[in-house]
Amino acid sequence: MAAALLATAGQAGARDLSLPLTGNLLGSVVDAGGIPQMGASVQLFNKYARLIARTNTAPDGRFAFASLPVDLYSIRVSLDSFLPAAREKIAIKAGLDSILQIHLATLFSNVEVSYAIPDAAMTDDWKWVLRSSPATRPINRLLPLDPDSPSSPELHPRIFSGTHVMLSMSGGDGGLIDSDSTQGDFGTGFALSTNVMGKNQVQVAGTFGQNSGIGPAAMALAAIYSRNDTGAFGAPPEVTFTMTQLGGLGPQMTGGQGTNAILGSTPVMRAMSLSVYQVADPLEDVHIEYGMTGESVDYVQHASRISPFARMTIDAGRAGQVIAAYSDGARPDELSAHQQYQAAADTDVPDNDFVDTVNMMARLPQLSDRNGVLELQRTQNYELGYNKRAGSRTYALSAFYEDVSNGQINVAGNLSVLDQGDLMSDGMSITSRYNIGNYQRDGYVASVNQKMTDRVDVAIAYGRMGGFTADAAGLSGSSGVQQRFLDGQNHNIAAANLLARIPVSGTRISASYGWVDSGAVVPRHIFTTQNTYVEPGLNIDVRQPLPFFGTPGHLELTGNLRNLLAQGYLPFDTGDGRTLLMVQAPRAVRGGLNFIF
């Protein structure tokens, strides 16, 4: 009996040790009519958006990646004459086949995911796909390269491939100083993305904003270079170069809204920046992102700054992720652009990158005047975060401390009580920028993101962080107002965000409502350890694709409604019957048209 029990235990242990720790990713690519597409390029990325495998579809449109470790992956499928299709957060489960149904189209491409338990079983068709896949095929014989032999795509790639372009036109409120954007009353923009010689990705984007005021139009131009392979010393860095020009900035004359005169002539502000972004994986579960941005600004005077940034992610598996981030100087736009988590409603929309690129290029440097001298805001930020995924739900908690030099707020109304040397206006926005000097603050935000369906995400957040309230004593005197009229305290904040895509029409809606303690203004903190943001009031972004027959591209209507309820307007009684307003985010309405092909 003892021998039998030992034999049984040994068999059970052997079975436990033989449990599968990998899964297969299988898929098929068809067009809108269900016809299999041969030769489509399929790229497989890990959860850090690093390319780990590549293959092409077989004559029956199938592809396969075998024996993948259990984790989250993403794919991107591209084929000439079709819009690319992409899918994030594909879970590879132990012992299961993750099956993708990919439908390519000239208007809308989509990816559907299902799971199946493999039987003894994999059909002969799938076995043939695995054997023939470049991603899994073993090398049987190595032959010297014959320069006279037919060229292969890998050895002799096309000079330009995977090229996509977006042209945009927009108009309305919410440009220039109001929102740190070069897009004025009427703006145009473009973005182009292409692969050069197969592995070098180049993106070029620009904006042109025409205003009704005096002076040159606002313009911005940027180029981003990255390489999608890895060498002996890791992937080369991503490099971003931007140039910005804006005319019409100057000190504020009096207190009118939107009709402010500019003293003297209107010199042109010119700015250039160069950013380098790099990644490293020193350990299996440790991912490090780091880099630096250099900026140079000329506007009457010259100002420059160097802004380093870094983020480290430690993946503890089921226990979640711990993320630490640091930045000093400018906004860490590169870290924000490479956030690891992306909402499900956007994962099958490859042209989202174009819109985000144009919006990022349109940002103005964080300029202000201090005693009549041009200054750049510098923010030293320390941030620590934790997130954990439990099925379709993601929990996140982030805390930060920041030390700000030459901080800025938007002000409107009776500005005569403020120091004119600390005011900057573009002569067209309803607000002016006021330099409030140096301050420190801290705070935290906890959030829960619930994936309702593949196309709907809902998130709620709550926290406390430093803000400003009115100190009435600061405005009582008439001989110069000091920065002390702002009394920094911690305040409650909350937000509810919705991201959805309507299946039939393809409408994409992003709506948010941000609440802050009454009588307070809380500057927005750009979190780099979670994707939560809190903006005051009701904000709605809408993108509506339109059919555009006869071409491989499509049209898209856009609408941006910001702070519809005009919340976050903090009034000050100046004692002369007029009011000074501190404005966190001005109410604005903007619309546009994008042509993507």
Image (tube, grey):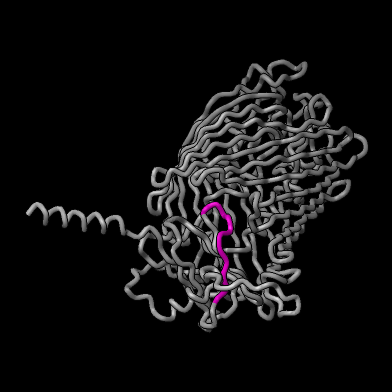
Compare residues 486 and 89 and report the one nearer the observer.
89
Residue plotted at (75% across, 25% down): 418
Q: Is residue 534 above or below residue 142?
A: above
Residue 277 is situated, as x and y percent measured from the top left of the image, at 68, 46
Q: Is residue 63 above or below residue 188?
A: below
Residue 451 is situated, as x and y percent measured from the top left of the image, at 43, 55
- Whether residue 404 appears in this view of the structure is yes
Q: Is residue 16 left or right of residue 532?
A: left
- Whether residue 461 appears in this view of the structure is no
Q: Quadrant of residue 407?
A: top right
Q: Is residue 30 above or below residue 567?
A: below
Please identify the quadrant where the C terminus is shown. Answer: bottom right
Q: Is residue 383 above or below residue 318?
A: above
Span highlighted in magenta in the image: 47-57
Count of numbered marks: 0
Residue 391 is situated, as x and y percent measured from the top left of the image, at 38, 53
Q: Is residue 246 magenta?
A: no
Q: Is residue 56 magenta?
A: yes
Q: Quadrant of residue 404?
A: top right
Q: Is residue 457 left or right of residue 10?
A: right
Residue plotted at (45% across, 67% down): 66
Residue 501 is situated, as x and y percent measured from the top left of the image, at 51, 62
Please identify the quadrant where the N terminus is shown. Answer: bottom left
Q: Residue furthest left?
A: 1
Residue plotted at (71% across, 54% down): 172
Q: Is residue 231 left or right of residue 217?
A: left
